[in-house]
Image (tube, rainbow, N blue to C red):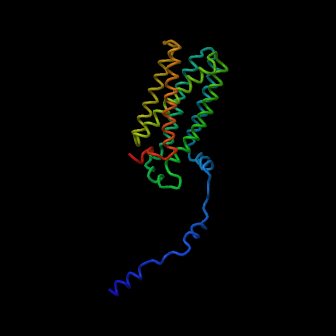
Amino acid sequence: MKIREALRGAFTPPEPRNKDRFIGSIRYPKLSYSEFILSQIGYIRKRVWLFSAAVLLIVISAVYMIPQNEMYLVWIVSTLIPFLALMTAMEISRSDIFGMSEIEAGCRYSLPQLVGARMIILGVCNFAVISAIAVILGFFSSLGMMRAVLYILTPYITVNGIALVVLDKATGLECVYINVAATLGVILTGIFLLGGMPFDARFVNILYTVLCVGGAIVIAIQGRKIMNGGDVCYGINH
């Protein structure tokens, strides 16, 4: 017994002294949440920014090259805008695709916070691009600003809503394939609806409005889950 007690006493670490004061004295970089969001800009791949710039340049070029065909301009834009949403979905799911979600979940800023920050950055960038395109089309065509915004924004919001739901339910390359298929489906639907306007314009306007509002609701629900760090962790809980 004496030997056992002696061994226990020899291998039992002493109680730490001034532990809290020592931890409090450690210096580490402290970031506000806004600074954290800005720091994530450098982690977004350059191809995303280049693609956004390319879409804007294509629209500007198309306005000068085909100024007499307004619906053809809208058709071109509606086939490009969904790819902005697809690029955003692929960027915010990169951690899961490359198997880094569990590591990032244990960092100081967790995976939901990283996803939320990148969603904010890319959302602001895409909103600026879409706003510029809507102003250009509204100014150079007789569609009017409201219709131009509706025809451009609806495909983007629809793909974003589908992508966020898919990212919540699928993982890895599976979510990539589903999102690509959904994006192509939205593009083909837009081509079918806007190609020469085979349908009544009022029907198309109502349909686009319903899709736009529905997609915005889905984005708001999924985005709130992410920002609150809830059940949606994009690959962690699958």
Q: Is residue 172 left or right of residue 136?
A: left
Provide residue 84's location: percent of width, then percent of height.
54, 33
**Figure check: 28 above or below 211:** below
Q: Residue 35 in the image: x percent, y percent? A: 63, 50
Seen at 51% across and 22% down, the residue is: 208
Q: Which x, y percent locates residue 185?
A: 44, 26
- Please state the total of marks drawn on the protein image: 0
Q: Name the residue furthest bottom.
A: 2
Classify 13 as above or below 153: below
Image quarter where the N terminus lies is: bottom left
Q: Quadrant of the C terminus?
A: top left
Q: Nearer the viewer, residue 169 or 43?
A: 169
Q: Quadrant of residue 150?
A: top right
Q: Is residue 112 above or below residue 85?
A: below
Q: Nearer the viewer, residue 111 or 185?
A: 111
Residue at the left extreme? Answer: 1
